Each structure stands twice: as structure tokens, then as C-alpha cells.
Image (spheres, grey):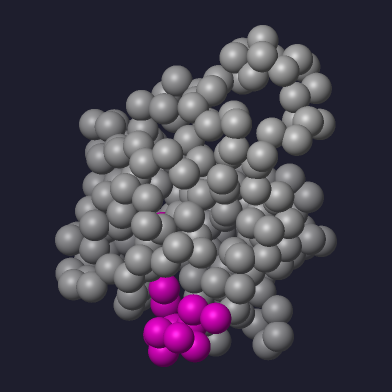
Amino acid sequence: MATIGFVRHGLTDWNALGRAQGLSDIPLNGEGRQQAKLLAERLKNGPWEAIVTSTLIRARETAEIIAHELGVRNVIQEHCIREIDCGLIEGTTEEQRIQTWGQQWRDLDLRMEPYEAVAARGSRFVNDISNKLNHQYILAVSHGAVIGLTLQQLMPHRFTTTYMDNASLTVITQVGDHWECTLYNDISHLQKDSIAYTYEPTNRNEVSP
């Protein structure tokens, strides 16, 4: 039975400005690095055996900070958990998109990667990675759209919409032939005077049936 801990990368300057990043290779800013350190401190006493990361630098930096704290020597890079290709909207804010294409810009063909394609590659990653690595507890450092769309694909009865905070932790566990989410978008480690929750489904972000 495999358990995967999905981590969204720490904050970047583009995140702070509300700019669509997509495949643009934007590094963490100072706050993002601090977020990653706080998350790493939370994870260091957990069961995690391996770390896989998107190839984009904001995810790699987050993964490397976590790996250093956990004593994991080899961080594995995977293209299939890179962020969605944002096409023509890459680098733009919501205000700029409305100015350029109007309020209904989401209905236009702006050369974005289809959500279905993102969900499919995320699901393939989840279903293949535990067998590939032969580990039971795996951390996967990825991106908001990839994590969210993967959850919707694997558990459509639980997730019709999703939102992933920077440096959040989401945990899914394989139960028979399906996956269950035991922790969703948890950022308790970023909150002042927070306690270090384990991955067990006992805190405020437990997903209800």
C-alpha cells in the first residue's frame, strides 16, 4: 500500500504578483524558501523514504530544502509532474488577461495544455511511481494545477474543485485498487504556534466522505 505526499512548491515572486507561471522557470523567493524550511521541519520525523520533484526550479528548490532536512540524498526529477503549460497567458495577471481577451478569456483557445491531459499525466505518475521506486512513502513536489487536477481525476466523488496553497501538504493513500485522500492542502506548519501534525487524517483538513 503506497502513500504519496503531494507538496506544492514554495512562494515565488510571480505567485505574489498573481502571474500565471506555467512552464516559466521562476525560482523561489525568500518567503518561499522559508516556507519550504518550515515544511521540511514538519516532515523530518515522518515516514518519507523518497522524494520526487518536477524539473522546474521552484519545485526543485523546495525538494532540495526538504531533502536536506530529511537526509534524503537522491531527489528524482520527473517531467510528468511539471506545471500545466499556460500557453499565451503565461506571465500574465488576471487583470491583464481581461484587458487583452475580455472577461470570457477562459472560453478562448489560448494554447493552454488541456486540463484532461494534465490530469492524465498526473494520474499516470501516481499509479506508476510506487512500483517504479519500490518505496511505500513518497513525497512528490509539484504544482497547484497538476496536484489539483490529479486529485479530481483520481477521486471525482470528493473533488470537483481544488485549490492548493504554496508549500501545502496533501496526502493520498492507495487502498486496494483506488486512492483515498487523508490530508488536503494542509498549511498548519506555516501558521504561528502551529503543531507538527503527522500525515494521519486527524487534523482540520481531513477530507470527509
Residue 146 in the image: x percent, y percent? 57, 53
Measuring from the top left, give residue 114's x and y in whole percent. 71, 50
Q: Which residues are magenta?
A: 128-141
Image position of 13 with respect to 47: above or below: above
Q: Position of residue 72 (x, y in %)?
A: 22, 71
The reply, left or right, for residue 205 in relation to residue 45 is: right
The residue that appears at 49% across and 70% down in the rendered structure is 4
Res 121 visible: yes
Whether the magenta-drawn stretch holds residue 137 is answered as yes
For the point 75% across and 24% down, the residue is: 105
Say left or right for 146 vs 207.
left
In this view, the residue in front, 3 or 57, is: 57
- Residue 8: x and y in percent read 45, 49
Image label count:
0
Q: Quadrant of residue 108?
A: top right
> Would you say residue 39 is visible in this rendering?
no
> Horizontally, is 146 left or right of 57 in the view?
right
Q: Is residue 16 above or below residue 100?
A: below
* Quadrant that contains the N terminus: bottom right
Residue at image coords 80%, 22%: 104
